[in-house]
Image: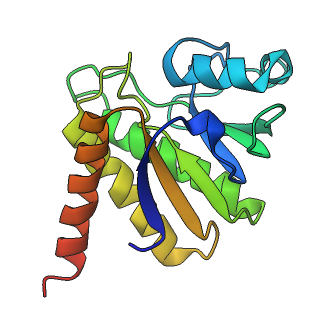
Amino acid sequence: MDRIEIVEGDITRLAVDAIVNAANSRLAGGGGVDGAIQSAAGPELLEECQTLDGCPTGSAKITAGYRLPAKYVIHAVGPVWQGGDHDEAELLASAYRTSLELAAALSLKTIAFPAISCGVYRYPLDQATRIAVTTIARFLEENESPQQVFIVCFNTETTLAFSQALSALSLESNPY
């Protein structure tokens, strides 16, 4: 778990190899994290996104970072919460996993994630954080890249939820 770090702050200011954008399936920009990333990166990011022909829920696509300190932006499309009976957990895990696979394919050392689907997509925070840390931890157990994963939280509530999920996962894997 030492390769996962939870931080509270602005994901657009992190000097990492890639930041993950909680994108919509049209890759058309939006509010929340997506809007902040689009604004900080400049109009070239949206222009490149428009050439990618969208992205299915549970998947991710990569672009340049443009004016961001990050070299790349990985656009991950998480599910909209519909009560939990529409494969939301699998789709959310897949969005994280696909993002990590893209980072590993480029041998990126550092990547930063937001809380995918926890904003306007209304995914319950306690469930989303467990899925995120479990998916990330499993991927890191089997892969050397990325070397460090940051989970960037926009408020104290989200930071605490991710910290609790990571602590619970650490206890599960090491009961002593």
Horizontal side of residue 90 vs 73, given as left or right: left
Q: Is residue 11 visible in this depiction of the protein?
A: yes
Q: Using the image as rendered, state which of residue 65 and residue 15 is in the foreground.
A: 15
Residue 160 on image: x %, y %: 24, 46
Q: Using the rendered view, name the quadrant where residue 110 is placed.
A: bottom right
* Count of residue discs: 0
Residue 172 on image: x %, y %: 18, 73
Residue 12 on image: x %, y %: 63, 34
Q: Residue at x 24, y 78 (%)?
A: 173
Residue 3 on image: x %, y %: 48, 70
Compared to residue 1, the image places residue 95 above or below, namely above
Residue that lies at the very extreme toward the bottom in this rendered image: 176
Q: Residue at x 20, y 23 (%)?
A: 83
Horizontal side of residue 72 vs 79, given as left or right: right
Q: Is residue 75 visible in this depiction of the protein?
A: no
Compared to residue 174, the image places residue 143 above or below, namely above
Q: Using the rendered view, name the quadrant where residue 23 is placed.
A: top right
Q: Residue at x 65, y 14 (%)?
A: 29
Horizontal side of residue 89 vs 62, given as left or right: left
Compared to residue 135, the image places residue 38 above or below, namely above
Q: Using the image as rendered, state which of residue 53 and residue 124 is in the foreground.
A: 124
Where, quadrant-wise, is the N terminus in this rendering? bottom left
Horizontal side of residue 43 vs 138, given as left or right: right
Where, quadrant-wise, is the C terminus in this rendering? bottom left
Q: Residue at x 75, y 66 (%)?
A: 107
Q: Using the image as rendered, state which of residue 3 and residue 93 is in the foreground.
A: 3
Q: Using the image as rendered, state which of residue 48 and residue 12 is in the foreground.
A: 12
* Colouring: rainbow
